[in-house]
Image (tube, rainbow, N blue to C red):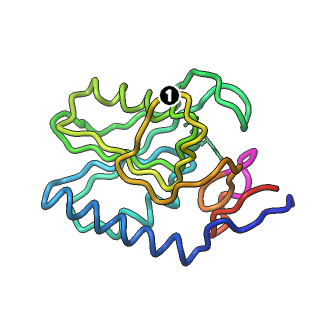
Amino acid sequence: MKDIKVLISEKDIKKRITELSQMISKDYKNEEIVAICLLKGATYFAVDLTKKIKNTMIIDFMKISSYGNNFKSSGKVNILFDITTDIKNKNVLIIEDIVDSGLTLNKIKEYLSLKEPASIKTCVLLNKKERREYPFEPDYTGFEIGDYFIVGYGLDYNDKYRNLPYVGYIE
Ligand code: IMP
Ligand code: MG
């Protein structure tokens, strides 16, 4: 096991998710939402967040792979698993674990926009602003963080450590 330090505690994650769910519920009023969870990283966040949103909701999933290793994106994304929901004229909320270079969310947003949803917004747990290579601003952000390599609460290093209940970083 690598040396993993706590960056954001389970308690602080829970508190922030409650705040995010309140903002989202308020903004969408009584509208129906199609929440799209990006696998695998956003699963823990998406489960906890969607349970707290009162709107009528459809949940769907997408799996994307970026080429390259764990630490560096290579400029390409590949859809491994697509949504099955018809999102035309629907309010789409993409739920993602972390925005780093901005490539993934830029590409996914562009791809889903072609399906003509009524609206499309993004909600990320973590935002590494200083790492941006492709301009991208999430609509809802859990926490702004520095340039750490994060594991836990869904995020992985070589597909491990997702089940840690907190957001940690590898030293
Ligand atoms: P982007 O396309 O460069 O914005 O990267 C987003 C994707 O890279 C996320 O969906 C994560 O899978 C992965 N990623 C970026 N930073 C980290 C990290 O610190 N820990 C684990 N995965 C990360
Ligand atoms: Mg990911």
Q: Quadrant of residue 74?
A: top right
Residue at 21% across / 34% down in the picture? 117
**What secondary structure is marked by label 1?**
loop
Residue at 57% across / 34% down in the picture? 101
Examine the residues drawn in magenta and state their main secondary structure. loop
In the foreground, 134 or 74:
134
In the foreground, 137 or 10:
137
Q: Is residue 47 above or below residue 11?
A: above
Residue 139, image x, y percentages: 34, 48
View quadrant of ligand 2 = top right
Q: Which residue is mark 1?
A: 134
Residue at 55% across / 78% down in the picture? 11
Residue at 48% across / 44% down in the picture? 38
Q: Quadrant of residue 46?
A: bottom left
Residue 105, image x, y percentages: 45, 35
| Residue that protrudes farthest toward the front in the picture | 130
Q: Is residue 23 above or below residue 95?
A: below
Mark 1 neighbour density, 10 Å: few (under 14) some (14–19) many (20 or more): some
| Residue that protrudes farthest toward the bottom in the picture | 11
Quadrant in the picture for the N terminus: bottom right
Side of 126 relative to 82 (left or right): right
Pointer 1 residue Cβ closer than 8 Å to ligand 1: yes
Residue 57, image x, y percentages: 25, 56
Q: Quadrant of residue 162?
A: bottom right
Q: Is residue 87 magenta?
A: no
Q: Is residue 100 above or below residue 116?
A: below
Q: Magenta residues? A: 156-161
